Amino acid sequence: MAKRQPRYVCQECGSVTNRWAGKCEACGAWNSISEETVPDPILAGTGKTSSVRGRPVRLESLAGTNDEPPRLETGIGELDRVTGGGFVPGSVLLVGGDPGIGKSTLLLQAAARLSSDGGHVVYISGEEAVAQVRLRAERLGVSGAPVALASETSVEDILATLSSGPRPSLVIIDSIQTLYTSIAESAPGTVSQVRASAQALIRYAKTSGATVVLVGHVTKDGQLAGPRVVEHMVDAVVTFEGDGSHSFRLLRATKNRFGPTDEIGVFEMTGSGLREVDNPSQLFLGERDTASPGAAVFAGMEGTRPLLVEIQALVAPSSLGTPRRAVVGWDSNRLAMVIAVLEARCGVRLGGNDVYLAVAGGLRITEPAADLAVAAALISSLGGLALPSDCVYFGEVSLSGRVRSVAHAAGRLKEAEKLGFGQAVVPESVATDSPKGLRTVAIGGLNDLIGRLFEDGEPDGLRGGSDASDARSAARP
């Protein structure tokens, strides 16, 4: 019998050491190193030569024709959008998300749709008993779907079950952290067990042609739990995001070998399960307050889908030595940059005020095209003037105070026109792409924005110092 040696593995990043330590030297996590015992052949760097001789493989050239991989459509449009048109047979998909966000609900609804259309779907639950899954199916109204259901955590038993019957079209494993295999002698959920279990299921998917969906837990930092190598092993990584205080959920692809990685799917959590949202802009703008200062509508893009969201800002006098900067749904460093540009290039006095910024609805925005909408919301809140309710904003702000063009301007303007907006404040270079029913206001810099917002005169306290006019003229070309 092979000699077994202990090793110490970080449960956060998967790094291996020969002794225990309170802090991982690779990722800096505390109390994440645990002892694992594995056979010698699994350990890397043993220096032993394998007695198994390999076989030569056929080498191909770059030239040639490739057929488009067939797709297994789930019938849920938002899920098919994110995956690139449906699941690819023989592929492995990793779905992550916070506990209770709706991962199991979404996959159970997709399994019911596929099985009702004639597909052979197997749902393996390692966290819940069969009775619990049946209760969820009854609540979702899909208990009549012919889904093959089992509750098992042994990888060997799962693979034997899948191989004993007809080849399934879709296999759902909920979740990968609950599985264990006899290859690795450690507790379920550890790095070795997750890696070995995922490798066995990936091998089954590639050899059988079945689509395998793995559900993964996330850490407190929002990262997928387990070794990062699992994300490299699978074909697609999809995260299910959302805020517990809001009903909508976002499905976002962070890796996809067979489709785009910039698409999102929008769902709404209801009492009967997840419902697709065909027009997310109406969802995020449904309860907009058009009479209050500090609210600007941003015409953004999520993948190929235009999305209109409301950006809310509150500028209030600070009683602290260091004013507060609180941001929800946007990059705090980006907010600091916009405030600095308004201070230095436009003379707007924000340094002595508390600044609060939030994206309405709990959505998180990452693109720099929101700079102009954020600046408009800040100026509106500081000046006490409500922005026009039928106006949208988009544009990237440079450090010189100029407003630069962004991609997909035509799609943003078309979405704004469809939702009834009458005007858009845009960079100068995209003003010619406006639809017929939408009036565009082209600006070259933030000083032009201030001049158009306060055409009847700027309120007292908006700009500081006698050199405000000099700063305004310096930012213009």
Image (cartoon, grey):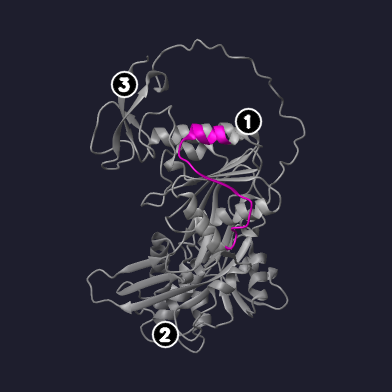
Disc 1 residue type (three-letter): Thr
Residue designated by label 3: 5
Q: Secondary structure at mark 3?
A: strand
Q: Quadrant of the N terminus?
A: top left
Query: At 40% from the left edge and 70% from the top edge, which residue is drawn?
Result: 357
- Report if residue 404 is visible in the image: no
User: x, y (%) of residue 268?
Assistant: 54, 66
Local SS, label 2: loop
Residue at the spot x=40%, y=14% of the render?
A: 47
**Is 348 situated above or below 328?**
below
Mark 1 highlights which residue? 207
Q: Does residue 157 belong to the magenta stretch?
A: yes
In the rendered image, the vertical position of residue 226 relative to residue 462, given as above or below: above
* Residue found farthest to the bottom: 456
Which residues fall within the magenta stretch?
141-161
- For image coordinates 57% across by 31% down, the residue present is 203
C-alpha separation, residue under disc 2 versus residue under disc 3: 69 Å
**Magenta stretch: includes residue 73:** no
